Amino acid sequence: MTTALITAPAALTLPDGRPARAAWSLDTVSVHINHGSFGAVPLVAQEHQNTLRAEMDAAPVAWFPTLPGLVREARTSIARFLGIDPSRTAMVPNASAGASVVYTSLPVRTGVEIVVTNHGYGAVTMGAERLARRWGGTVRTAHIPLNATAAEAHDAIVAEFSDSTGLVVIDQITSPTARLLPVDTVSAEAKRRGIPVFVDGAHVPGLYDRPLDGVDCDFWVGNLHKFGCAPRGASVLVGRGPLADELYPLIDSWGAPYPFPERFDTQGTLDQTSYLAAPTSLSFIEETWGWSNARQYMTELADYAESIIAEAFTAATGDDHLVDAGMPVNALRLVRLPRGLAGSHPEADALRDRAVDELGLEGAFTCFDGVGYFRLSTHVYNTPADFEYFAERCVPALGDWAREALRAL
Ligand SMILES: Cc1ncc(COP(=O)(O)O)c(C=O)c1O
């Protein structure tokens, strides 16, 4: 693959002219180009959460009885942002919790098959495997090539459906491979066959407008604390269709007699201020740049970043490092690493840790089918200089580390 020369977009600024990053508390010691893993919270939302915590700590007896009502208001506002029905939307702490709720709530179906894909998030796939074991069933894995088109990915997933399929678990944006999967057509086909579908949309909120339009799945989870920039521990679980009212929170509390999703608003004595402050992050980005402009900037920056990083690797190795991800994501991209790096999941994690220590890089490294990748994320606070640093400083170091690794074989 070759890249046309891609121009860097002008970095975003705040209304007072300061760089966008001044609205975050990210340190200046590191380059932060892995928003996709743990997000980053703007100061205004941190301050809102701190204020809420102060109120909670000042008068807990007054605070806790009001909490379910506050959670309800927050999820209504979040659901409106996502273009989904608030009466189908529950708050959960994270995508893992959403998956756990689905897996523990579904009625037992002995001996059924659960269909997952080879691009699934490890922890969510492991949960599906445990569920299959509990049900005395099995997991069937759809193998989708990294560069599969929507139609090819659809066909690969649907080919694993059978009369015994009891659940499909599919990512909307995949974590190791930073690509989209055709959750709309797969959900439609599953529905036609009466198979429940759980869509893991962990990365989706903030990245795509109205992400559930045209996606008729039974369950969907999305993290607000990734691209939505909410305080960590704020996610939504959407439940629709005949099984929605089977969903119960992991913490069984006084909400139990209520229907879905109200029963999720009561979680015992728990700090749920992350839910309450999440709308502040969403509004901050809307009011400062507008989400639509923010997404356009993130996309243009990702195009630029991907091209300069792949070119830098190519200059060092002579190989092509651009990746055809089939259905690419706007603000998450993969660049192939030199051979010898991140050939397994533990090696990818070790590379991430070494890059933090030796390069001041907060980055993400992934492995898929034994090949190592650098996964870059862009957000409004990133600038072209972040990725130029990677191309100029990190690429040569990674080249040295790859040569070291190959020599050690
Ligand atoms: C696709 C996917 N699913 C689930 C998760 C888990 O998210 P959390 O750690 O917020 O539970 C992630 C995290 O990166 C993810 O990428």
Image (cartoon, rainbow, N blue to C red):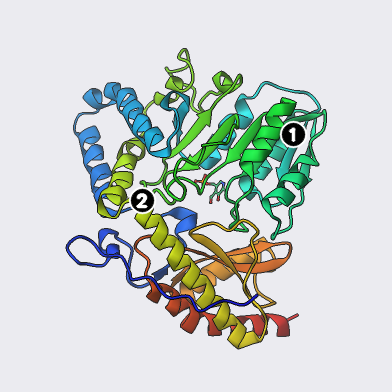
Quadrant of the image containing the N terminus: bottom right
Answer with the quarter of the image where residue 80 lies: top left
From the viewer's perspective, is residue 313 above or below residue 52? Answer: below
**Secondary element type, mark 2:** helix
- Report, in whole angstroms, how far the alpha carbon at label 2 lies from the one at label 1: 40 Å
Q: Amino acid at mark 2?
A: Trp
Can residue 322 be seen here? The reply is yes
The one nearer the camera, 56 or 361, is 361
Number of marks in picture: 2
**Which sits in the foreground, 214 or 365?**
214
Q: Quick check: marks 2 and 1 in contact, CB under 8 Å?
A: no
Would you name the residue on which mark 1 appears?
A: 132
- Specify few, some or many for label 2: CA neighbours under 10 Å numbering under 14, 14-19, or 20 or more: many
Q: Is residue 144 above or below residue 378?
A: above
Q: Which residue is mark 2?
A: 291
Tag 1 secondary structure:
helix
Corner quadrant of residue 109: top right
Query: Relative to 75, is 390 on the left or the right?
Result: right
* Residue type at the position of mark 1: Ala
